[in-house]
Amino acid sequence: MRDKPANKPAEPGKRFSSLSLRNAIVLGIALGIVIPAMLLGSVLARDSYEREYEVRVRGPLRQYASMLEQTMPIPLWQVDAEAAQSFVNSVMLNPDVVRISVEDAALGRFVHAEQANAQQQDLISETRDVRKDGAIIGRVTIEMSSHLMEQEFLKKFLKGGAAILVQLLISFFLLWLLFQRRMMRPLQQLQLDVDRLGEGQFAEPVHVARSDELGSLALGVDTMRVRLGELMQIQADQNLTLEQRVADRTQELHGSNQELRMALENLNNAQLEIQRTDRLAALGSLVAGVAHELNTPIGNSVTVASTIHDLSNEFRKRMALGMTRAQLQTYVEKNLQASDILLRNLHSAAELIGSFKRVAVDRTSAQRRAFLLDEVIRETVLTMGTSIKRSIHEVRMDVPADIWMDSYPGLLGQIISNLINNAILHGFDGRENGVISIHAHRVDVEPAAVQLSVSDNGVGISEANMTRIFDPFFTTKLGQGGSGLGLNIVYNLICDVLGGSIRVESKLGTGASFIMHLPLHAPGADAGE
């Protein structure tokens, strides 16, 4: 007996995979039959299981719970345990029902029933409150097991699976026999010819024994044999110039990268300069807002102080001439009224100055702290009062007073300012008496968050611009007061610093809404760090 030759690595061109063509086709036939059958069978089995589960367990559970919820109020109210037990026993006739418990809101357990040898696995339960005239007087809990249903379903599944398996085996055998006769034998001969070509033996032509598709394939391989030499020569000629062409293209690419790098640096510098200009403009607007808002209370205070001064001079003259008790009482009452008006106006001015100071500190330091959302928004709108009143528009707020945030109030105020200015500049273009609505509410997610929206009833945003409004330097007011950075700054602050997201909803003629999702606790270091 000759020794079995040692295994050698497969030579290129002889083996393209670890599976032979025969094995690959057989495997393909098997997978083509088995995988669709398994997928379809699993889908059908799952669908059948869900329907059986709904009919046998989940549906009856809801029905029993509803029935007990409707029948228990009278027994509970009349403390009639025997009647309640009767209702419970009628439901317990279903073998899938494991346990029923009826509790009185005041007395605790009222009625309890449980199967003696019930399965304690695959349980689902439902609890309903028992009400009497709208008041909760008890609770009923019913538990059901899907164990019996699953056992019956498994038996039917195994029977069906066995029938499908027999059918699959018959189909596989017939297909394998067909492929063996019509494909495998011609392919084996073609494989021998291709192996010979792979070894460089181009003199002998490829064997063409059939006139079907495999014969056409063999004829194509023979044509490839003739063209192979020509293509190899052409490839050798092209490789002579390939290295030089690669070197030239690399040099061109290096020059283009240098130009792009310089253009990007100039673009970043321009963006920083425009942002600095916007901050200076915002500071000017803040100063104007301070002067405008303080003018009214300080003017009123000056008027009241002058009135008090005149009353005091008149009082001194009357004292020299003598006065009655009624005149003295009149002077005291007028003085108290004037003093009260003066204190209210000065207190209002102090509150305005405090608000402006907090806004200014937040804007300049951008420090993180805990704050009430409605206070920050109200103070931001207050500082913009001049520009809002000058444009004859109205800002309406609907922000709960108990939303605490641990974030960056200065950045949040800048976001609100930019969105209001964007509505005034773009949304109300050519319009008066526009309305800007600011709304906020908590969102029940983890981590805790708030949804904040700034909406207007302006001209809206066209569909073509919806995907570009957050791009830097994109503006429909180029050269008319728009820098194209307002919404880009809003997007970057929300996504990169505040850890939130923003989206826009708009239709032409109906206004636009900018909807922000902000976490109550901003990402990054804690406020105390």
Image (cartoon, rainbow, N blue to C red):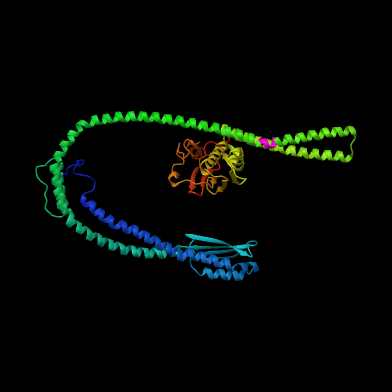
- Rendering coords of residue 346 (x, y %): 71, 36
> Which one is in front, 156 or 290?
290
Task: Let me know if residue 366 appears in the view.
Answer: no
Q: Is residue 464 left or right of residue 130?
A: left
Image quarter for residue 450?
A: top right
Q: Is 297 included in the stretch rendered in magenta?
A: yes
Q: Residue at x 45, y 36 (%)?
A: 473
Q: Residue at x 77, y 38 (%)?
A: 338
- Rendering coords of residue 197 (x, y %): 14, 43
> Which one is in front, 345 or 172?
345
Q: Residue at x 31, y 57 (%)?
A: 36
Q: Is residue 41 left or right of residue 217?
A: right
> Which one is in front, 517 or 44?
517
Q: Kindly give the residue lying farthest to the front in the view shown.
A: 430
Determine whether 370 is above or below 67 in the image: above
Question: What's the magenta region?
Answer: 294-298
- Rendering coords of residue 129 (x, y %): 59, 62
* Numbered circles on residues, count: 0
Task: Let me know if residue 352 appears in the view.
Answer: yes
Q: Is 427 included in the stretch rendered in magenta?
A: no
> Which one is in front, 105 or 134?
134
For the C terminus, give its image quadrant. Answer: top right
Determine whether 212 is above or below 411 in the image: below
| Overall secondary structure of the magenta section | helix
- Rendering coords of residue 252 (x, y %): 30, 29
